[in-house]
Image (cartoon, grey):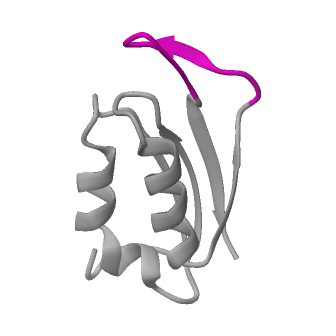
Amino acid sequence: MQGKNTGNIFLKMDVEGYERNVLEGARQTLSGNGISINCAICTYHKSGDAEEISAMLSENSFESQFTEGFLFFEKELRKAVVRSKKR
């Protein structure tokens, strides 16, 4: 994001199971200091996404919380959306 105003970013993500890949590709931006980042990311497409995505965000100094309730997806109850804010 070189040359762009990155002072305040809102990231909304629902990419049909590729959320972890996108976060991995955005690692440099997410780890940046002095950037205000808020995000809402779907976590129900793949089993284990909720924990993995939450951990990836935590590693980059994000505070996260999940929306209340669960979504029934592929014969499992899964947490649907994580909302996070850079600390």
Q: Residue furthest right?
A: 68
Question: Was residue 73 drawn as part of the magenta stretch in this picture?
Answer: yes
Residue 5 in sight from this viewpoint = no
Q: Is 62 left, or right, of 41 in this rendering? A: right
Magenta part of the protein: which range? 68-78
Classify residue 27 by image quadrant: bottom left
Classify residue 7 by image quadrant: bottom right
Q: Is 63 left, or right, of 14 in this rendering? A: right
Q: Residue at x 23, y 54 (%)?
A: 21
Q: Quadrant of the N terminus?
A: bottom left
Residue 10 in sight from this viewpoint = yes
Question: Was residue 75 drawn as part of the magenta stretch in this picture?
Answer: yes
Q: Residue furthest bottom?
A: 33
Classify 83 as above or below 8.
above
Judge by depth and name the residue closer to the eye, 87 or 66.
66
Classify 32 as above or below 80.
below
Q: Is 56 left, or right, of 87 in this rendering? A: left
In the rendered picture of this protein, how many numbered marks are placed on residues?
Answer: 0
Q: Residue at x 24, y 41 (%)?
A: 18
Find residue 67 and report its horizontal and vertical position in percent: 71, 33
